[in-house]
Amino acid sequence: MLSLADLVGDEFPARRAVFRPGAVPDPGEIASVADIDRVLTGSGLRAPGIRVVKDGSVIPSAHYTSPSTYGYAGLDDVVDPGKVVRLYRKGATLVLGTVNLLLPRLHELCKTVERDVGHPVDANVYVAPPGARAFDVHCDAQDIIVIQAHGAKEWTLFDDIVPNPGGGKLVAPEGDGSTYELRAGDVLHLPRGMPHLVRTAASASVHITISVNTLTWADLLKGFVTDLLRSDEYAAALPMGAGLAERVQPMVRQYADRLAAALTEAATAPAVHEMIYSRPAFGEAHQGGLFSQALLGAPIGPSDRISLRPGTWPLVGEARIKAGDRTFRVPGAVAAACELLMSGPAKVGELAGDPGEAVKIARALVELGLCAPPAPCP
């Protein structure tokens, strides 16, 4: 599996664009045209999973959905492949959002990048016909890594980086910018806030955008402060009487100081870990092979190598492992082995002094879904 360094080299995060021609030798291994066809035509895709855009405008989903039935449930937002393809032929760009959840190899890559950057990562796929322009010049709130998967696409980048771009926005940069033509296998990294315009020329295009959904200090502090403000102290009513604002204003500093002291006390290392990695934005770790392992099983030996699944961020206690919204009560030896694997892959035999015990520990971590089935050592 490709790593972050394979995609962008050593320049991440960069405060300038990084263009790496041919960095991905076979982009079809990540997401092929056949994979995207299956998502569009054979997955029962629903409207939230796709946007259809043309000349800067989003086409309402009613133009490409049809009523459908799943079992006994009537649904009115199921994507109609025929309608989508007709819109594409008329010049519309298809945007498959968070499509890594439907493409296992792309999901594994996102989770591998996520492990390197420490922030949530997901991916969109953009399918554009020749001569298309989906969006006007805009900037994104994320660092993005673009992988050209098929055809070619022209990216015009502007140096007027917008600091702290929030949700991203349309911009009107000065100058002509710098233009890059991406062909299959090329990679382009844009820092968050860099304005850009994307177009196709004579060729149709499929590109993958891996988004690093940057967590901010506001995200972290808001979580702690929200929890603290639920205490009885802050549920007390403001005083009654005339001139309320004038009476309360001198007291604000007092409550703010208490809140700051409580925040400092609450922000222990385990609490910060949980506040960050339990966020829904991180989603589930890469779960490829989980069912096959449960159904078929596979022998595990002391010489096999084992590692945490990409996107697994465990919080380990003496006899507890918490990963996302799941908590497992486990023997202390299993918890200790999980903590060891947080530093990187290891041989199964290194998980315990006794080889038989080490195999039992490895099997437990695999069955919990925290570790992928081990690969034999070379």
Image: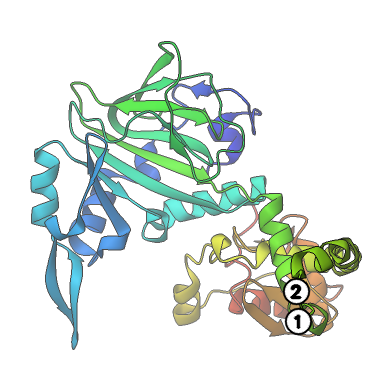
**Residue 64 in view here:** no
Relative to 376, residue 214 above or below: above
Q: Is residue 118 left or right of residue 352?
A: left
Image coordinates of residue 9 in percent, x first then y, are 61, 28
Q: Amino acid at mark 2?
A: Ala
Mark 2 and mark 1 residues within 8 Å of each other at the beta carbon: no
**Residue 283, numbered circle:** none
- Judging by the rendered image, the residue that carries numbered circle 2 is 242
- Judging by the rendered image, the residue that carries numbered circle 1 is 237
- In this rendering, the count of numbered labels is 2
Relative to 234, residue 152 above or below: above
Q: Secondary structure at mark 1?
A: loop
Image coordinates of residue 247 in percent, x first then y, are 83, 68
Q: Amino acid at mark 1?
A: Ala
**Residue 323 in view here:** yes
User: Image point 61% across, 32% down: which residue?
Assistant: 163
Relative to 3, residue 180 above or below: above
Inter-mark Cα distance, 2 to 1: 15 Å
User: Image point 76% across, 63% down: which residue?
Assistant: 273
User: Image point 53% across, 41% down: which residue?
Assistant: 141
Q: Quadrant of residue 236?
A: bottom right
Image coordinates of residue 130 in percent, x first then y, are 17, 28
Single out the mark in the foreground, 2 or 1: 2
User: Image point 60% across, 59% down: which residue?
Assistant: 311
Q: Secondary structure at mark 2?
A: loop
Sooner in the amino-acid sequence: mark 2 or mark 1: 1
Q: Which one is in front, 154 or 57?
A: 57
